[in-house]
Image (cartoon, grey):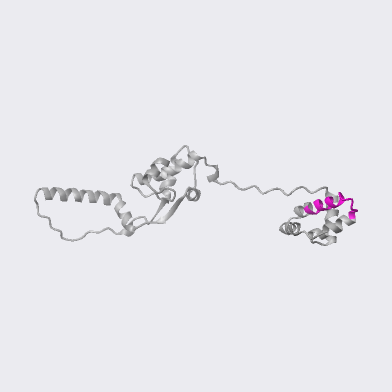
């Protein structure tokens, strides 16, 4: 009888699992007994097929006889996460909450998103770390942004620029002389450097259609 590589590999995969080892040896011995081999002959052939010692097979047979036929080892149940428990409607709702910050020209930080999500009665209350994982699963990426972009989007800078342009337009229409005396600047380091970005959305139209 030829040497069978696959059973040997299977046995070694479960060498730390006594139940799996018993089941494999038991199956091979039954196959040999069905061929009208004696018990000792069946044990010898099983040891040769699996590449283990006859004494090991004898010990397993005795153990099986004392406890009965081995059962298949229980399968490990995969752990479910909060993300898995969310239905598609809830996932879309979280995505819409993040997109709403961009519509308001506001930076969607994790703290702000957490407050909005937990205020939504249709969504489960999430912890900060859990929300972080959910956003990553939804395709959002926490990344560093350009300082110039952040300055342009700051609400006080927007209002300041608007007042300046309106004043310049008014003074020019009145024919006034305009003198530029010095420069004024805002420190870019006072802005948020990181923001959540949806990597699954590539245009404003797509964000509007998909929520």
Residue 50 in picture, x, y percent from top left? 79, 59
Q: Is residue 169 above or below residue 54?
A: above
Residue 202 in picture, x, y percent from top left? 40, 49
The span shown in magenta is 24-39
- Secondary structure mostly seen in magenta is helix
Task: Name the residue rendered at 23%, 51% in the picture.
Answer: 161
Closer to the camera in the image, 5 or 89: 5
35 in the magenta segment: yes
33 in the magenta segment: yes
Q: Residue furthest front?
A: 2
Task: Name the residue rendered at 41%, 45% in the picture.
Answer: 98
Task: Name the residue rendered at 40%, 47% in the picture.
Answer: 112
Residue 211 seen in the figure:
no
Residue 49 in picture, x, y percent from top left? 80, 58
Describe residue 55's horizontal placement relative to residue 71 as left or right: right
The N terminus sits in image quarter: bottom right
């Amino acid at each position: 009888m030829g040497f069978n590589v696959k059973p040997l590999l299977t046995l070694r995969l479960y060498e730390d699992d006594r139940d799996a080892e018993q089941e494999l040896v038991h199956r091979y011995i039954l196959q040999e007994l069905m061929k009208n081999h004696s018990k000792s002959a069946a044990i010898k052939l099983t040891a040769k097929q699996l590449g283990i010692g006859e004494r090991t097979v004898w010990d397993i047979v005795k153990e099986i006889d004392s406890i009965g036929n081995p059962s298949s080892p229980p399968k490990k149940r995969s752990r479910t996460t909060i993300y898995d428990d969310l239905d598609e409607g809830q996932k879309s709702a979280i995505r819409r909450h993040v997109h709403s910050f961009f519509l308001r020209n506001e930076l969607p930080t994790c703290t702000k998103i957490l407050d909005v999500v937990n205020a939504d009665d249709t969504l489960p209350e999430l912890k900060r770390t859990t929300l972080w994982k959910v956003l990553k699963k939804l395709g959002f990426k926490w990344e560093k942004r350009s300082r110039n972009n952040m300055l342009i989007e700051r609400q006080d800078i927007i209002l300041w620029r608007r007042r300046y342009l309106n004043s310049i337009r008014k003074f020019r229409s009145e024919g006034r002389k305009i003198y530029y005396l010095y420069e004024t600047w805002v420190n870019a380091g006072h802005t948020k450097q990181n923001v959540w970005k949806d990597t699954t959305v590539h245009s404003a139209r797509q964000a509007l259609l998909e929520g």
